[in-house]
């Protein structure tokens, strides 16, 4: 226990303390590249080192990166805003591709999210025994890819890093998964890459149609320079939206998600639900909206209906599930619907809500999946009919699960509330501009989804954790969570509490990106 | 004046082939033929190194006979080795070298008395392919092409006691002869219209002529004849049977070297000779249809395959479709994309075929289900299959992704958005069957967990193939620049 604590605290302190002087300034350390390179180095080290050190290396690097994530969050200068810590290296000059990393308020939040889930995932994988070396290699590579995707300001590298993350996911699900793992792995990969095929063609179309001939998102966001016509935007916006939407499990392209999460090993579903899935909503805000604002204004009211179906439909399906993990998986789909709905409102409040909900969903979904995985590891079943009364044998995990449920439902004081509140505020406000009332008509239906969420989570908590103990053997054999199992879940709960109790720094941070974006687009006025 | 640099690699290859035949007389027939093997490998490496001399022509102090413009030519300009030819020659020679390596492993498991003859014919065929890339005249081009294909018929049917190999050779011969006849027929019309056989002169003469139905017919016949060689749908029917039945090294050779030579012929004939306003829209339209058909048919028919060589055959049809996309876009951008993609395709495909040969030598099977648990039997082969196949599918961060980005980018730049869309969607379809192989290799526990042996050269080559495929995914710039300057040599 103490050695684990040391492996966490020492690297955390090193990265948090040591880098203080070199983070800012003209010759700053390439801190953003570190988020990509550190996990890759970790993967290489695991490859070389003996198997028994694999988890230690991963944990040390994850803690190091976590420290760096907090550092980045605290050092982002709100007074300056815009993209900071920018690294710009030309890569293929004649094609206008450069390796550009940079973060603004929104992506700073996302990087923080990645580091939190990375850390929790490294801990939750502590007891993996099957092909452990390969597991930690792939796990680290996955994180490197996701971090790169959130930081990239170049469409080529954005795409490269995104798919870089999908590939380890395929192997993680296929090898370490449970149930119909090969089917799930294939389905997930094919869906995600089919979505990305649309993205890729969209990116290339933007590149060759615009007048600036670059893949640099900053340059492409200047509509007067790119000269993308309204008809071009109207054609390509829905394609890009759907391409990104597939990543975020947009209805009707969501079916990879429950199967994928149902089969994935715990840490993989944490990372996927927590950070990879959020990439869809993030990239709509980062790429689709600023590059094609007219297309957005034309299509978003219709696409909002898809997002709404997401919320409601997934919630209803979650009610009927008989597998513990599938309930959580559908709940994640439903929450992603909220994110997309927030984006569709094109209101400052709605978009901020979407960003906060992305962050919150990342933390909360990771926490819930960690809990499911831990419970499954102890009770050896995920069938709801066979589970029951687990609080009496694992009180701490039971308590944590109730807290996680509340965070999912959106209880005030936890992070879920802030995001959902802002999203619905945005959709309500959206109606006041120029008699456009579709969102006013839609949002009560969305609120219904929250009620359903409460129903299925309470049902879940009641079926799994309360009532009589279903299996008498559990009393002797099953113990409560150990230190390494409790620690990551507790850590994520604390983050969720922090956002819920004092959301101001997070909302302010997100607004640093959203406010200029709303100015740029102009909303439905 | 004859400048020897113009056909230096071919001299090396033909010389080596004769040396190999002589060396066989010296060695006892029961020996392992190390001498023959060594001569062959050294000869091909020598041919590869001679490319430096050709490419550096003009700046090289030793070669006083070099022309001022740095492009060596021979036989009254019928052979002209420009940058484009050098690039194609590199691919072909590299593929030949790797084919040799694969064949050593293959014939260790399937002994034959005729290894020497095999190597000699392979070298002759490579010389034909190599000469084809610098041919500036249609008769030279045809002769070089026939040297390549007639040797290939022999090679495909080389396992003469094997029914499937015989079937492969027979099918290849019958259909190949037919396609060659078509090609020659097309050429004869072309000569009739222009009165010359030099490709650039044909271009000049056609520029002043209006299009006529007969000329269109000639173009269609030339496309059909050559499309057969690179197995574009609907001229692809022979591919799966021949690829499955032919010895594995020859399957690898056909899928890379033969295809590259076919594309070289296409590029010269169409972008130099037939690139005239009267004809261009016709053949570009035809190519668009062929490319899309190949992408769709190749990928769809690959889905149900259970034999890895058959699967690679359909995959190579689809790959030819992707490459054709860049070819029909043409210009600096399109041809650079074609060259870069072929370069990437070379290393991914050859790596996979080497792995197939090594596995086949051990298990005696080409069935995908027998690849189960390969990660345990040989981790390196597992990685090669994963990286190589995913690069073919165009998944980042592997080199195939950068290649497809460039190919489809060039297509979109000329407004062929629909081709790019179809290409991308079917790349995802291709992912399914590529991953089926990777899945077998990486997921299950092996039924028979005896390790798979390979020697250090094979290990080294596999590692190099993987490293190149990964590195070019992250850093394609150097090869991209080479491809660019090669492509630009066509337009000077």
Image (tube, rainbow, N blue to C red):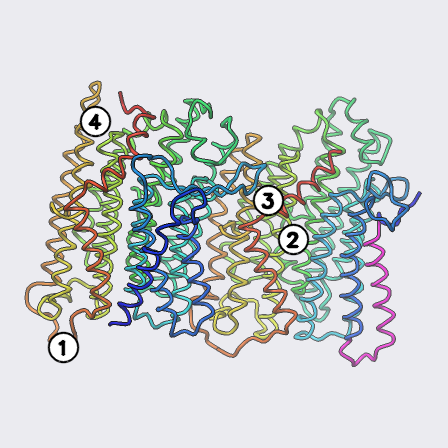
**Which residue is the site of mark 1?**
A473
Q: Secondary structure at mark 3?
A: helix
Q: Nearer the viewer, residue A61 or B146?
A: A61
* Residue A323 in sight in this render: no
Q: Are marks 2 and 3 in contact (CB under 8 Å)?
A: no
- Please report, as a chain letter, where disc 3 is located: B
Reply yes or no: does residue A62 show up in magenta.
Answer: no
Q: CA distance from mark 2 to mark 3?
A: 16 Å
Q: Residue A258's x, y, as percent?
A: 28, 53
Which numbered disc flags the more N-terminal residue, 4 or 1?
4
**Which residue is the site of mark 4?**
A430
Reply yes or no: does residue B22 show up in magenta.
Answer: yes
- What predominant SS class does the magenta segment belong to? helix
**Which residue is the site of mark 2?**
B238
**Viewer-nearest of discs 4 and 2:** 4
At 32% from the left edge and 28% from the top edge, which residue is drawn?
A299
Q: Are marks 4 and 1 in contact (CB under 8 Å)?
A: no
Q: Secondary structure at mark 1?
A: helix
Q: CA distance from mark 3 to mark 1?
A: 61 Å
The residues colored magenta run B7-33
Q: Residue A85's x, y, as percent?
A: 40, 43
Quarter of the image that includes the N terminus of chain A: bottom left
**Viewer-nearest of discs 2 and 3:** 3
Q: Secondary structure at mark 2?
A: helix
- Name the residue at the left extreme: A467
Relative to A483, residue A344 above or below:
above
Q: Secondary structure at mark 4?
A: helix
* Label 4 and label 1 in one chain: yes
**Viewer-nearest of discs 4 and 1:** 4
**Which residue is the site of mark 3?**
B321
Q: Are marks 4 and 3 in contact (CB under 8 Å)?
A: no
* Residue A418 in sight in this render: yes
């Amino acid at each position: 226990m103490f050695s684990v604590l040391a492996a966490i605290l020492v690297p955390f302190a090193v990265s948090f303390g040591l880098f203080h002087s070199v983070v800012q300034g003209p010759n700053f350390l390439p801190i953003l590249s570190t988020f990509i390179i550190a996990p890759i180095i970790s993967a290489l080290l695991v490859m070389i080192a003996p198997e028994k050190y694999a988890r230690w290396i991963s944990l040390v690097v994850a803690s190091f990166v976590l420290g760096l994530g907090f550092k980045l969050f605290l050092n982002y200068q709100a007074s300056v805003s815009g993209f900071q810590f920018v690294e710009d290296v030309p890569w293929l000059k004649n094609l206008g591709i450069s390796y550009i990393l940079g973060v603004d308020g929104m992506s700073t939040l996302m990087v923080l999210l990645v580091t939190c889930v990375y850390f929790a995932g490294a801990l939750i994988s502590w007891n993996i025994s099957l092909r452990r070396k390969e597991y930690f290699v792939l796990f680290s590579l996955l994180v490197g890819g996701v971090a790169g995707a959130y930081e990239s300001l170049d469409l080529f590298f954005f795409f490269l890093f995104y798919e870089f993350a999908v590939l380890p996911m395929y192997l993680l699900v296929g090898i370490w998964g449970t149930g119909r793992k090969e089917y799930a792995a294939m389905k997930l990969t094919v869906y995600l890459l089919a979505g990305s095929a649309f993205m890729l063609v969209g990116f290339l179309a933007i590149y060759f149609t615009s007048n600036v001939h670059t893949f640099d998102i900053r340059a492409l966001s200047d509509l007067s320079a790119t000269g993308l016509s309204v008809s071009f935007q109207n054609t390509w916006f829905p394609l890009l939206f759907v391409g990104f939407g597939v990543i975020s499990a947009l209805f009707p392209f969501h079916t990879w998600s429950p199967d994928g999460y149902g089969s994935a090993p715990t840490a993989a579903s944490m990372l996927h639900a927590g950070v990879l899935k959020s990439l869809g909503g993030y990239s709509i805000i980062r790429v689709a909206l600023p590059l094609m604002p007219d297309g957005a204004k034309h299509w978003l009211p219709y696409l909002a209906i898809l997002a709404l179906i997401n919320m409601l439909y997934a919630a209803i399906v979650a009610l009927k599930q008989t597998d513990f993990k599938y309930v959580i998986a559908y709940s994640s789909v439903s929450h992603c619907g909220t994110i997309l709905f927030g984006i569709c409102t094109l209101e400052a409040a709605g978009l901020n809500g979407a960003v906060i909900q992305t962050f919150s969903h990342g933390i909360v979904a990771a926490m819930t999946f960690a809990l499911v995985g831990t419970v499954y590891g102890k009770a050896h079943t995920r069938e709801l009919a066979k589970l029951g009364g687990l609080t009496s044998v694992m009180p701490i995990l039971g308590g944590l699960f109730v807290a996680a449920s509340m965070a999912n439902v959106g209880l005030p004081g936890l992070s879920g509330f802030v995001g959902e509140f802002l999203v619905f505020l945005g959709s309500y406000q959206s109606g006041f501009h120029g008699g456009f009332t579709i969102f006013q008509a839609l949002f009560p239906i969305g609120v219904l989804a929250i009620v359903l969420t409460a129903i299925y989570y309470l049902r879940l908590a009641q079926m799994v954790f309360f009532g009589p103990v279903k299996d008498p053997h559990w009393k002797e054999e099953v113990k409560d969570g150990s230190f390494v199992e409790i620690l990551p879940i507790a850590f994520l709960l604390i983050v969720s509490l922090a956002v819920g109790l004092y959301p101001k720094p997070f909302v302010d941070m997100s607004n640093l990106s959203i406010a200029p974006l709303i100015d740029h687009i102009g909303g439905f006025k | 004046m004859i400048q020897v640099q113009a056909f230096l690699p071919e001299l090396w290859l033909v010389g080596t082939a004769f040396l190999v035949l002589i060396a066989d007389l010296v060695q006892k027939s029961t020996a392992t033929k190390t001498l023959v093997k060594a001569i062959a490998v050294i000869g091909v490496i020598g041919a590869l190194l001679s490319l430096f001399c050709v490419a550096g022509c003009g700046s090289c102090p030793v070669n006083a006979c070099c022309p001022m413009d740095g492009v060596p030519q021979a036989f009254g300009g019928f052979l002209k080795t420009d940058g484009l030819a050098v690039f194609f020659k590199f691919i072909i020679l590299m593929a030949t070298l790797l084919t040799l390596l694969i064949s050593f492993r293959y014939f260790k498991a399937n002994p034959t008395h005729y290894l020497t003859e095999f190597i000699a014919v392979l070298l002759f065929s490579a010389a034909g392919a190599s000469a084809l890339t610098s041919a500036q005249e249609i008769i030279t081009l045809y002769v070089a092409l026939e040297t390549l294909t007639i040797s290939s018929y022999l090679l495909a049917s080389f396992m003469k006691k094997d029914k499937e190999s015989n079937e492969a050779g027979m099918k290849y011969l019958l259909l190949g002869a037919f396609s060659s006849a078509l090609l020659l027929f097309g050429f004869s019309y072309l000569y009739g219209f222009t009165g010359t056989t030099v490709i650039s002169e044909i271009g000049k003469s056609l520029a002043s002529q209006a299009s006529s139905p007969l000329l269109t017919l000639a173009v269609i016949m030339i496309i059909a004849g050559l499309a057969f060689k690179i197995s574009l749908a609907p001229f692809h029917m022979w591919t799966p049977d021949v690829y499955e039945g032919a010895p594995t090294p020859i399957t690898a050779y056909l899928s890379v070297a033969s295809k590259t030579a076919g594309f070289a012929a296409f590029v010269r004939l169409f972008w130099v000779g037939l690139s005239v306003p009267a004809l261009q829209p016709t053949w570009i339209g035809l190519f668009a249809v062929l490319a899309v058909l190949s992408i769709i048919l190749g990928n769809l028919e690959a889905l149900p395959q259970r034999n890895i060589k058959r699967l690679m055959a359909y995959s190579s049809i689809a790959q030819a479709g992707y490459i054709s996309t860049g070819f029909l876009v043409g210009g600096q951008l399109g041809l650079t994309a074609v060259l870069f993609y072929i370069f990437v395709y070379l290393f991914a495909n050859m790596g996979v075929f080497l792995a197939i040969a090594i596995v086949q030598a051990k298990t005696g099977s080409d069935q995908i289900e027998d690849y189960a648990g390969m990660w345990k039997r040989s981790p390196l082969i597992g990685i090669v299959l994963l990286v190589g196949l995913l690069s073919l599918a165009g998944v980042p961060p592997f080199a195939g992704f950068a290649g497809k980005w460039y190919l489809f980018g060039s297509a979109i730049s000329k407004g062929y958005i629909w081709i790019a869309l179809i290409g991308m969607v079917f790349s995802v379809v291709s992912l399914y069957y590529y991953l089926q192989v990777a899945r077998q290799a990486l997921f299950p526990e092996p039924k028979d967990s005896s390790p798979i042996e390979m020697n250090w050269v094979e290990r080294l080559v596999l590692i190099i193939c993987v490293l190149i495929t990964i590195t070019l995914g992250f850093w394609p710039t150097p090869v991209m620049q080479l491809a660019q300057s090669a492509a630009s040599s066509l337009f000077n």
